[in-house]
Structure formats: C-alpha cells, structure tokens
C-alpha cells in the first residue's frame, strides 16, 4: 500500500495470478480497518496544502508523471499483459492511452477558468470561482487496469483534490506500478494514496460515508455502482459513475458489409470482449447478413488465443473462472433457444491453454429477444448477430436496453448516419469509427451506464465545486 508518501506492508496479503497460466505472479497487502483510516486521514491532511498549490505546480508534477510513464511504457505493458492477460500490443496501446490523460490534464489544470457575471444591480458584481471538491475516493476495474486509474487521478489532481485509490483485486500490481511513478514524480505525501484490498466493500462504505471524503469516482459494474451511488446519495457525496454497457452496432444497407465486419471484429474481440464499449449486439440488414457473417466468422476463427507475451497472439484469456462461466452460460442459453454457432462456442483448453481462462472467439447468428445475450452485458468474445428489416425497427431495437454507453453505426449515407446519431440514446457513438475514445473526448454513458463524463474539458469539472461571490460595491 502507499499511504502518506510511504510504502506499507499489511498484516496480511493476497495473491495475484496470471489469467493466461494460473500462475501466481505476486502478492499484495490486504488493507484492514486501520490502513483505510490512515489513508483517509493522510488525504484529508494533505488537502489543506495541496489545494493551495498553483495550477502550474500541479501541472508540472502531472507532466513529470507523464514523462516517466512514457519512458516505462514497455515495462508497464509487459506487467499489464502478465496480470490482466491482453496481448502485449494492446497493453502498449493502453499504457499510451493512460499516459494521454496525464498530459491532457497537465494542460487543463491551467484552464480552470472562473467567470465574472454582470448583475442587474448597478452596485453589484458576481464572481464565480472554481475550487477543488476535496478528498476523492477512486475505485477502478481490472479490464483497463492503468488507463482507468489515470482517467480519474489526472483530473482530480489537476483540480487540486487529494486521492485514495482502490484498484480491482485482480490487478493491484498495475496500480502499484502507477503509484511508483507518482512517487518518483514528486507528489507530496498524502496527495495520492493506494489501498490494495481483497474484499472491497469496507473501502466502498468508507468512501460513501466518511465526512472527510467528498467525492466517489467509480468504474465497474452497474450493480455495484448503483449500491455505492445509493449510499453516497444519503451522505450527499459527489459521484461519477462509469458503469456497464450493451453497445449496439448497426450495419445499414448502404454500408459495405465486408468492411463493417472487419471493423467490428477488431473492436468486438479487443481485450477479449472485456470492454464496457464492446459491441454486444450486432444488427445487420437481412439482405447483407450472409457476406457479413462470412467475413466476421473468417476473422474470428483466425484469431490465435494464448499468452499475450508470445508472438502472434490475437486474443488473451478472460479474467477468471467466473467470467468463463458467465460467457459460456450465455452461449449455451442462446444455442438452446435456436442461435446458430458459426465459429467458437466453447472454452479452449488444448495446446497449453488449460491453465488459463480461454474462450474461443465466437460468432452467433439467429439471436433473438428471448435469449439472455440479447439483454445482458457479455464481457467476453461473443459476437451475436441479429438481423433487421427497417431503419425504424433497428433504432428501436438498439435503444431497447437499460444501458446507454456506446453504439456503433456503419453507413455511407450522411443522412442515415446523422438520423441514427440523433436517434440513438447512447453517450458515445462511433460512425464508421471503431475507436471513438481519446483523452480529449468526453467518455460516459446515459441511463444505467452511469453519471458524469471522464476525459475532455468536462473531465476536470467532475472534481470542481462552483463558488459564487456576490460583491456589493
Ligand atoms: P465490479 O463492479 O465487480 O468491480 C469494479 C470495482 O469495484 C473493483 O475495484 C472492485 O473491487 C470494486 N467493488 C466491487 N464491489 C464493491 C463494493 N461492494 N464496494 C466497493 N467496491 C467494490 O466490476 P468488474 O466486473 O470488475 O468490471 C467490469 C464492469 O465494469 C463491467 O460492467 C464494465 O462494463 C464496467 N466498466 C465500465 C467502464 C466505463 O467507463 N463505463 C470501463 C470499464 C469497465
């Protein structure tokens, strides 16, 4: 753990395993009640001085952390592949994406502008000032174990907040590596603190109830997000919630189905489908289903599964046994209700894969509403294809979900694309674009996908309070 600028062992610890092999790759401290209290106290005390630093001082520290991160890109990526399982090239991309947030918010720190507002009264002036929220509790997931940390910490630190980070129990080593970077960059003691813990519920409770913590920022499942949001609400905390998704991808009849299949196979199988913006329902016009499915199947069946540190690996493992069970359960349910398997459809245990949590890249067609996969987030390498007849039908089907994070459209007609963009109830929409994410662009969802936005200009607002001064002169 890293508390008040010092590394700390715990009274007990827990193991971290490589999901590709099942091998134990490290042990980390298991925070107890006293450690949690020490971290909250350190962040609270540090806030008094940190909030008085200038934006230029905070910017310089973030910039230094960015430099260190870029310099250590390959070591961080290798650690990520060992701990989380994604192929090395994908880990390198994630480290770069993670570093981008440090640089972006090093710059945005200097643009926390206030306002002077004209008053209706001659002898009055209004001044609007932005100030940091205070101590922030940050809870991050395992699927993007570095970028989800910087996407929260960079804007919080830029704004002048202090932070306690609780990473996912499957990927604490990436969090520890990031803490080493922040430590080396020279952030003062207590400004950033790390609690690794096997059972996260007590930390979550403290973040939502302790009066010294002013804000909770959470990325994870909708179920846990809702529980924490409820508790935070009763204690009047600020929250940001980046939750689950069930992204539709629509291939319109004017698009090239082969080109669309190429793009959607890349984004579907990225990170073994363990992404909140992964396409979960692929809607293809019935006239184009055949060439689309053929191309998608051919690409999925050629992906080589294995340990992401080896050459030529296109798809890594799922995170754990539970994830394999969930994915397999959805596939079996779909088959039992009439879906057709074009490739995959089972766990992979041959050719040295038996120690890990591998599932074959899978293409299903004939997916219909009664199937679980039609409604539930999958978080695995399954591409369910659903056919449709009209634009009106497909927009209604795409919006028919409790989630509202990402959506994808393939169309070569500007009118169709614009109508779909406007009609889809999602926070992020890729139009002939499979990667609509960047530190410069607002990331977040509608409905049960969450509250607030990360990245972009809006990202820093999540960590700022607005203070009004009314001056009678
Ligand atoms: P999860 O909710 O189980 O865990 C996420 C984090 O919450 C972990 O750090 C975990 O330790 C912690 N946590 C779990 N229970 C807790 C509790 N009671 N109190 C406090 N903390 C608790 O989710 P997961 O399965 O690890 O992650 C996958 C989910 O995250 C998916 O639903 C995915 O869509 C979502 N996700 C969303 C985004 C986004 O930006 N919207 C990004 C990545 C992942």
Image (tube, rainbow, N blue to C red):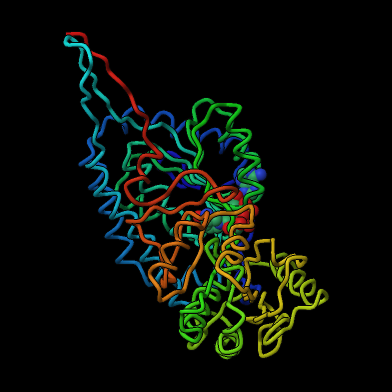
Q: Residue at x 58, y 70 (%)?
A: 390
Position of residue 274 relative to residue 457, above or below, is below
Left or right of residue 400, residue 108 in this image:
left
Q: Quadrant of residue 171?
A: bottom right
> Residue 237's spot in the image, x, y percent?
52, 30
Q: Residue at x 35, y 32 (%)?
A: 132
Left or right of residue 55, residue 234 in this image:
right
Quarter of the figure with the C terminus: top left
Q: Residue at x 48, y 69 (%)?
A: 409
Q: Residue at x 36, y 39 (%)?
A: 461
Callout count = 0
Which residue is at the front of the view, 296 or 303? 296
Position of residue 162 relative to residue 210, above or below, is below
Q: Is residue 13 visible?
A: no
> Residue 18's spot in the image, x, y percent?
60, 71
Left or right of residue 96, residue 83 in this image:
right
Q: Is residue 129 visible?
A: yes
Which residue is at the front of the view, 254 or 128? 254
> Residue 129's spot in the image, x, y percent?
27, 27
Q: Quadrant of residue 364?
A: bottom right
Left or right of residue 393, residue 330 in this image:
right
Which residue is at the front of the view, 202 or 270? 270
> Residue 70's spot in the image, x, y percent?
31, 65
């Amino acid at each position: 753990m890293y508390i008040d600028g010092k590394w700390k062992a715990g009274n007990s610890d827990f193991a971290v395993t490589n999901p590709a092999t099942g091998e134990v790759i490290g042990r980390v401290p298991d925070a107890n009640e006293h450690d949690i209290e020490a971290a909250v106290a350190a962040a609270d005390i540090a806030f008094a001085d940190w909030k008085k630093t200038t934006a230029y001082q905070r910017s310089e520290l973030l910039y230094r952390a960015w430099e260190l991160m870029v310099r250590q890109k390959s070591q961080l990526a290798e650690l990520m592949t060992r701990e989380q399982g994604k192929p090395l090239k994908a880990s390198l991309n994630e480290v770069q994406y993670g570093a981008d947030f440090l640089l972006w918010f090093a710059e945005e720190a200097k643009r926390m502008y206030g306002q002077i507002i004209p008053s209706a009264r001659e002898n009055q002036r209004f001044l609007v000032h932005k100030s940091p929220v205070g101590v922030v509790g940050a809870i991050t997931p395992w699927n993007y174990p570095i970028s989800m940390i910087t996407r929260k910490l960079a804007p919080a630190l830029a704004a002048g907040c202090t932070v306690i980070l609780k990473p996912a129990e499957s990927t604490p080593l990436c969090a520890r590596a990031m803490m080493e970077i922040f430590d080396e960059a020279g952030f003062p003691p207590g400004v950033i603190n790390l609690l690794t813990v096997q059972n996260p519920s007590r930390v979550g409770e403290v973040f939502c109830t302790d009066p010294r913590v002013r804000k909770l920022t959470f990325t994870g499942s909708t179920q846990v997000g809702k529980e924490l949001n409820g508790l935070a609400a009763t204690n009047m905390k600020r929250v940001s919630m980046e939750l689950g998704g069930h992204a539709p991808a629509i291939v319109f009849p004017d698009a090239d189905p082969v080109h669309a299949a190429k793009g959607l196979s890349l984004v579907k199988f990225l990170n073994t489908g363990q992404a909140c913006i992964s396409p979960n329902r692929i809607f293809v016009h019935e006239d184009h289903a055949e060439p689309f499915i053929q191309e998608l199947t051919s690409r999925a069946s050629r992906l080589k599964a294995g340990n992401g540190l080896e050459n030529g690996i296109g798809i890594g493992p799922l995170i754990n046994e539970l994830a394999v069970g969930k994915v397999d359960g959805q596939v079996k349910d779909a088959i039992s209700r009439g879906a057709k398997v074009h490739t995959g459809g089972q766990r992979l245990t041959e050719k040295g894969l038996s120690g890990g949590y591998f599932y074959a890249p899978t293409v299903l067609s004939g997916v219909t509403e009664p199937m679980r996969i039609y409604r539930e987030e999958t978080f695995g390498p399954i591409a369910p294809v659903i056919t449709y007849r009209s634009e009106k039908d497909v927009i209604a089907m795409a919006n028919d979900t409790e989630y509202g994070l990402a959506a994808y459209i393939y169309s070569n007609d500007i009118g169709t694309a614009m109508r779909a963009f406007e009609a889809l109830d999602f926070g992020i929409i890729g139009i002939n674009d499979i990667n609509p994410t960047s530190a410069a662009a607002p990331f977040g969802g509608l409905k049960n996908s969450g509250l607030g936005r990360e990245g972009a200009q809006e990202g820093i607002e999540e960590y700022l309070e607005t203070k009004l001064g009314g001056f009678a002169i």
